[in-house]
Amino acid sequence: MPDDRSTICLTFDFDAISLWLARGMASPGPVSRGEFGAHAMPRILKLLRERGITATFFVPGHTVDTYPAECAAIAEAGHEIALHGYVHEPVSKLDRAGELAAAVRARESIVKVTGYEPVGNRTPSWDFTPSTVDVLLELGCEYDSSLMATDYTPYYARRGDVADPDGPYRFGEPTTLVELPVSWTLDDYPQFEYLRMDTAVLPGLREPAGVFRNFLDDVDYMLRDVPGGVCVLTFHPQVIGRGHRMLGLERFLDACLQRPLDFRTCADVARAFRAA
Ligand SMILES: [Zn+2]
Protein backbone atom coordinates (compact mmCIF):
# COMPACT_ATOMS: atom_id res chain seq x y z
CA MET A 1 0.00 0.00 0.00
CA PRO A 2 1.23 3.53 -0.69
CA ASP A 3 1.25 4.63 2.96
CA ASP A 4 1.08 3.30 6.47
CA ARG A 5 -2.61 4.00 6.92
CA SER A 6 -4.60 0.83 7.45
CA THR A 7 -7.78 -0.08 5.61
CA ILE A 8 -11.00 -1.95 6.27
CA CYS A 9 -12.79 -3.56 3.34
CA LEU A 10 -16.38 -3.93 4.46
CA THR A 11 -17.90 -6.64 2.26
CA PHE A 12 -21.45 -7.98 2.01
CA ASP A 13 -22.30 -11.24 0.26
CA PHE A 14 -25.85 -10.62 -0.95
CA ASP A 15 -26.64 -14.30 -1.47
CA ALA A 16 -30.41 -14.02 -0.90
CA ILE A 17 -32.29 -17.08 -2.19
CA SER A 18 -29.39 -18.45 -4.25
CA LEU A 19 -27.61 -19.70 -1.13
CA TRP A 20 -30.51 -22.03 -0.33
CA LEU A 21 -31.05 -23.16 -3.90
CA ALA A 22 -27.38 -24.14 -4.10
CA ARG A 23 -27.96 -26.42 -1.11
CA GLY A 24 -31.00 -27.98 -2.77
CA MET A 25 -33.31 -26.26 -0.27
CA ALA A 26 -36.00 -24.74 -2.49
CA SER A 27 -39.02 -25.05 -0.21
CA PRO A 28 -40.72 -21.90 1.16
CA GLY A 29 -38.99 -22.05 4.55
CA PRO A 30 -35.35 -21.75 3.47
CA VAL A 31 -36.34 -19.53 0.54
CA SER A 32 -37.87 -17.09 3.05
CA ARG A 33 -34.55 -16.97 4.93
CA GLY A 34 -32.96 -15.84 1.70
CA GLU A 35 -35.74 -13.33 1.05
CA PHE A 36 -34.94 -11.68 4.35
CA GLY A 37 -31.60 -10.63 2.89
CA ALA A 38 -33.38 -8.44 0.35
CA HIS A 39 -35.72 -7.13 3.05
CA ALA A 40 -32.68 -6.05 5.10
CA MET A 41 -30.82 -4.35 2.26
CA PRO A 42 -32.37 -0.86 2.74
CA ARG A 43 -31.34 -0.75 6.41
CA ILE A 44 -27.79 -1.77 5.52
CA LEU A 45 -27.56 0.86 2.79
CA LYS A 46 -28.99 3.45 5.20
CA LEU A 47 -26.36 2.63 7.83
CA LEU A 48 -23.53 2.88 5.29
CA ARG A 49 -24.92 6.17 3.95
CA GLU A 50 -25.21 7.65 7.45
CA ARG A 51 -21.62 6.65 8.29
CA GLY A 52 -20.23 7.71 4.91
CA ILE A 53 -18.80 4.24 4.26
CA THR A 54 -18.33 2.73 0.79
CA ALA A 55 -18.46 -1.07 0.70
CA THR A 56 -18.14 -3.97 -1.72
CA PHE A 57 -21.12 -6.24 -2.40
CA PHE A 58 -20.46 -9.69 -3.83
CA VAL A 59 -23.72 -10.60 -5.54
CA PRO A 60 -24.63 -13.86 -7.33
CA GLY A 61 -26.18 -13.34 -10.77
CA HIS A 62 -29.32 -15.08 -9.51
CA THR A 63 -29.73 -12.41 -6.83
CA VAL A 64 -29.22 -9.63 -9.39
CA ASP A 65 -31.87 -11.19 -11.66
CA THR A 66 -34.29 -11.75 -8.76
CA TYR A 67 -33.77 -8.37 -7.06
CA PRO A 68 -32.72 -5.91 -9.77
CA ALA A 69 -34.08 -2.86 -7.93
CA GLU A 70 -32.22 -3.69 -4.72
CA CYS A 71 -28.99 -4.29 -6.66
CA ALA A 72 -29.42 -1.07 -8.64
CA ALA A 73 -29.78 0.75 -5.31
CA ILE A 74 -26.43 -0.69 -4.17
CA ALA A 75 -24.72 0.58 -7.31
CA GLU A 76 -26.48 3.97 -7.21
CA ALA A 77 -25.23 4.46 -3.64
CA GLY A 78 -21.67 4.22 -4.99
CA HIS A 79 -20.83 0.78 -3.65
CA GLU A 80 -18.91 -1.76 -5.69
CA ILE A 81 -20.71 -4.85 -7.01
CA ALA A 82 -18.53 -7.86 -7.75
CA LEU A 83 -18.92 -11.50 -8.81
CA HIS A 84 -20.14 -14.27 -6.49
CA GLY A 85 -21.14 -17.09 -8.84
CA TYR A 86 -24.44 -17.36 -10.67
CA VAL A 87 -26.55 -19.37 -8.24
CA HIS A 88 -23.96 -19.69 -5.46
CA GLU A 89 -22.69 -22.92 -7.02
CA PRO A 90 -19.62 -24.45 -5.32
CA VAL A 91 -16.99 -24.22 -8.05
CA SER A 92 -15.35 -27.50 -7.05
CA LYS A 93 -18.49 -29.27 -8.30
CA LEU A 94 -17.97 -27.76 -11.78
CA ASP A 95 -15.44 -28.43 -14.52
CA ARG A 96 -13.46 -25.51 -15.92
CA ALA A 97 -16.01 -24.79 -18.66
CA GLY A 98 -18.83 -24.82 -16.12
CA GLU A 99 -16.94 -22.52 -13.78
CA LEU A 100 -16.33 -20.07 -16.62
CA ALA A 101 -19.94 -20.28 -17.85
CA ALA A 102 -21.35 -19.50 -14.39
CA ALA A 103 -19.06 -16.50 -14.04
CA VAL A 104 -19.84 -15.20 -17.53
CA ARG A 105 -23.58 -15.45 -16.87
CA ALA A 106 -23.18 -13.71 -13.51
CA ARG A 107 -21.16 -10.94 -15.11
CA GLU A 108 -23.90 -10.34 -17.70
CA SER A 109 -26.48 -9.97 -14.91
CA ILE A 110 -24.29 -7.46 -13.06
CA VAL A 111 -23.57 -5.41 -16.19
CA LYS A 112 -27.31 -5.14 -16.80
CA VAL A 113 -27.92 -3.30 -13.50
CA THR A 114 -24.63 -1.46 -13.02
CA GLY A 115 -23.55 -0.68 -16.59
CA TYR A 116 -19.98 -1.76 -15.77
CA GLU A 117 -18.07 -5.03 -15.79
CA PRO A 118 -17.20 -6.27 -12.32
CA VAL A 119 -13.46 -6.36 -11.62
CA GLY A 120 -13.51 -8.62 -8.58
CA ASN A 121 -14.73 -11.99 -7.44
CA ARG A 122 -15.51 -13.95 -4.32
CA THR A 123 -16.17 -17.64 -4.87
CA PRO A 124 -19.38 -18.95 -3.27
CA SER A 125 -18.54 -20.40 0.16
CA TRP A 126 -14.86 -19.58 -0.57
CA ASP A 127 -14.66 -22.78 -2.58
CA PHE A 128 -11.76 -22.77 -5.07
CA THR A 129 -10.38 -24.95 -7.88
CA PRO A 130 -7.01 -25.16 -9.68
CA SER A 131 -8.78 -23.35 -12.58
CA THR A 132 -10.32 -20.49 -10.59
CA VAL A 133 -7.44 -18.03 -10.95
CA ASP A 134 -7.18 -18.53 -14.72
CA VAL A 135 -10.96 -18.30 -15.17
CA LEU A 136 -10.99 -14.97 -13.34
CA LEU A 137 -8.04 -13.63 -15.33
CA GLU A 138 -9.79 -14.71 -18.53
CA LEU A 139 -12.78 -12.63 -17.42
CA GLY A 140 -10.56 -9.61 -16.86
CA CYS A 141 -10.84 -9.69 -13.07
CA GLU A 142 -8.27 -7.71 -11.11
CA TYR A 143 -8.79 -9.34 -7.75
CA ASP A 144 -10.33 -12.22 -5.83
CA SER A 145 -11.32 -12.35 -2.18
CA SER A 146 -11.73 -16.00 -1.17
CA LEU A 147 -8.40 -17.33 0.12
CA MET A 148 -6.80 -17.21 3.57
CA ALA A 149 -3.00 -17.42 3.27
CA THR A 150 -2.45 -14.09 5.05
CA ASP A 151 -4.63 -11.88 7.25
CA TYR A 152 -3.80 -8.20 6.65
CA THR A 153 -1.63 -8.42 3.54
CA PRO A 154 -2.91 -8.66 -0.04
CA TYR A 155 -0.90 -10.99 -2.24
CA TYR A 156 -0.86 -12.37 -5.78
CA ALA A 157 -2.86 -15.57 -6.26
CA ARG A 158 -0.90 -18.51 -7.72
CA ARG A 159 -1.52 -20.97 -10.52
CA GLY A 160 0.04 -24.40 -10.93
CA ASP A 161 0.45 -25.53 -7.31
CA VAL A 162 1.18 -29.25 -6.91
CA ALA A 163 0.07 -31.10 -3.78
CA ASP A 164 2.21 -34.19 -3.52
CA PRO A 165 1.64 -36.19 -0.32
CA ASP A 166 5.08 -37.84 -0.76
CA GLY A 167 7.04 -34.58 -0.72
CA PRO A 168 6.91 -30.92 0.17
CA TYR A 169 4.06 -28.85 -1.22
CA ARG A 170 5.13 -27.25 -4.51
CA PHE A 171 3.99 -23.65 -4.89
CA GLY A 172 3.10 -22.50 -8.39
CA GLU A 173 3.81 -19.13 -9.97
CA PRO A 174 2.19 -15.90 -8.82
CA THR A 175 -0.24 -14.37 -11.30
CA THR A 176 -1.44 -10.77 -11.64
CA LEU A 177 -4.68 -11.55 -9.77
CA VAL A 178 -4.63 -9.76 -6.41
CA GLU A 179 -5.92 -11.82 -3.51
CA LEU A 180 -7.62 -9.92 -0.67
CA PRO A 181 -7.57 -12.51 2.12
CA VAL A 182 -10.63 -13.50 4.11
CA SER A 183 -11.24 -15.63 7.20
CA TRP A 184 -14.13 -17.50 8.76
CA THR A 185 -13.19 -15.69 11.97
CA LEU A 186 -14.20 -12.40 10.32
CA ASP A 187 -17.41 -13.70 8.72
CA ASP A 188 -20.80 -13.16 10.33
CA TYR A 189 -22.26 -16.40 8.96
CA PRO A 190 -20.67 -19.05 11.23
CA GLN A 191 -20.90 -16.67 14.20
CA PHE A 192 -24.61 -15.97 13.98
CA GLU A 193 -26.52 -18.25 11.63
CA TYR A 194 -28.34 -21.23 13.11
CA LEU A 195 -28.53 -24.09 10.63
CA ARG A 196 -29.65 -27.66 11.12
CA MET A 197 -28.64 -30.15 8.45
CA ASP A 198 -28.95 -33.93 8.25
CA THR A 199 -25.38 -34.49 9.38
CA ALA A 200 -24.51 -31.42 11.43
CA VAL A 201 -25.79 -28.41 13.32
CA LEU A 202 -24.25 -24.97 12.89
CA PRO A 203 -25.20 -23.43 16.25
CA GLY A 204 -24.50 -19.75 15.50
CA LEU A 205 -26.71 -17.35 17.51
CA ARG A 206 -23.77 -15.76 19.31
CA GLU A 207 -24.10 -12.52 21.19
CA PRO A 208 -23.07 -9.66 18.86
CA ALA A 209 -21.03 -7.85 21.53
CA GLY A 210 -18.58 -10.77 21.79
CA VAL A 211 -18.35 -11.29 18.04
CA PHE A 212 -17.71 -7.62 17.34
CA ARG A 213 -15.18 -7.47 20.19
CA ASN A 214 -13.23 -10.16 18.31
CA PHE A 215 -13.56 -8.23 15.06
CA LEU A 216 -12.37 -5.02 16.71
CA ASP A 217 -9.43 -6.80 18.35
CA ASP A 218 -8.36 -8.01 14.89
CA VAL A 219 -8.58 -4.41 13.65
CA ASP A 220 -6.60 -3.14 16.64
CA TYR A 221 -3.91 -5.80 16.18
CA MET A 222 -3.54 -4.65 12.57
CA LEU A 223 -3.28 -1.02 13.65
CA ARG A 224 -0.58 -1.86 16.20
CA ASP A 225 1.49 -4.50 14.40
CA VAL A 226 0.75 -4.35 10.67
CA PRO A 227 0.78 -0.69 9.59
CA GLY A 228 -0.76 -0.20 6.18
CA GLY A 229 -2.65 -3.48 6.57
CA VAL A 230 -5.98 -4.41 5.03
CA CYS A 231 -8.70 -6.13 7.07
CA VAL A 232 -11.49 -7.75 5.03
CA LEU A 233 -14.76 -8.28 6.93
CA THR A 234 -17.55 -10.41 5.49
CA PHE A 235 -21.25 -9.93 6.22
CA HIS A 236 -24.44 -11.35 4.76
CA PRO A 237 -27.58 -9.17 4.66
CA GLN A 238 -29.75 -12.17 5.63
CA VAL A 239 -27.58 -12.69 8.73
CA ILE A 240 -26.45 -9.24 9.87
CA GLY A 241 -29.79 -7.60 9.01
CA ARG A 242 -31.49 -8.70 12.28
CA GLY A 243 -32.07 -5.89 14.77
CA HIS A 244 -29.64 -6.82 17.54
CA ARG A 245 -26.90 -7.57 15.02
CA MET A 246 -27.48 -4.29 13.18
CA LEU A 247 -27.00 -2.49 16.50
CA GLY A 248 -23.79 -4.46 17.02
CA LEU A 249 -22.59 -3.55 13.52
CA GLU A 250 -23.41 0.12 14.13
CA ARG A 251 -21.36 0.17 17.34
CA PHE A 252 -18.50 -1.64 15.65
CA LEU A 253 -18.42 0.80 12.71
CA ASP A 254 -18.53 3.77 15.08
CA ALA A 255 -15.57 2.34 17.00
CA CYS A 256 -13.66 1.86 13.74
CA LEU A 257 -14.48 5.39 12.60
CA GLN A 258 -12.72 6.70 15.71
CA ARG A 259 -9.51 4.94 14.70
CA PRO A 260 -6.89 6.08 12.17
CA LEU A 261 -8.02 3.93 9.25
CA ASP A 262 -9.96 4.17 5.99
CA PHE A 263 -12.89 2.22 4.59
CA ARG A 264 -12.29 1.39 0.94
CA THR A 265 -13.74 -0.89 -1.69
CA CYS A 266 -11.91 -4.08 -2.62
CA ALA A 267 -11.36 -2.74 -6.16
CA ASP A 268 -9.66 0.39 -4.79
CA VAL A 269 -7.43 -1.65 -2.51
CA ALA A 270 -6.50 -4.13 -5.25
CA ARG A 271 -5.59 -1.31 -7.63
CA ALA A 272 -3.48 0.45 -5.00
CA PHE A 273 -1.69 -2.83 -4.27
CA ARG A 274 -0.90 -3.39 -7.94
CA ALA A 275 0.23 0.21 -8.37
CA ALA A 276 2.59 -0.08 -5.40
ZN1 LIG B 1 -22.19 -16.31 -0.52
Image (tube, rainbow, N blue to C red):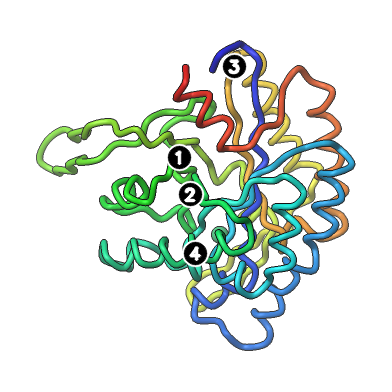
| Amino acid type at image mark 3 | Gly
- Marks 2 and 3, the one that precedes in the sequence: 2
Q: Which percent across, then down, holds residue 76?
A: 75, 52
- Numbered tag placed on residue 162 in the rendering: none
Name which residue lies at 27% across and 65% down. 97
| Amino acid type at image mark 1 | Tyr
Which quadrant holds residue 60? bottom right
Q: Eyeballing the image, is 26 above or below 207?
A: below
2 and 1 marks in contact (CB < 8 Å): yes
- Marks 1 and 4, the one that precedes in the sequence: 4
Cα–Cα span, label 4 and label 3: 35 Å
Tag 4, which secondary structure?
helix
Q: Eyeballing the image, is 48 above or below 44?
A: above
1 and 4 marks in contact (CB < 8 Å): no
Estimate how packed mark 3 is, as few (under 14), some (14 to 19) or many (20 or more) residues with alpha carbons within 10 Å: some
- Whether disc 2's CB lies below 8 Å from ligand 1 is answered no
Cα–Cα span, label 3 and label 1: 19 Å
Label 4 belongs to which residue? 108
- Whether disc 3's CB lies below 8 Å from ligand 1 is answered no
Label 1 belongs to which residue? 143
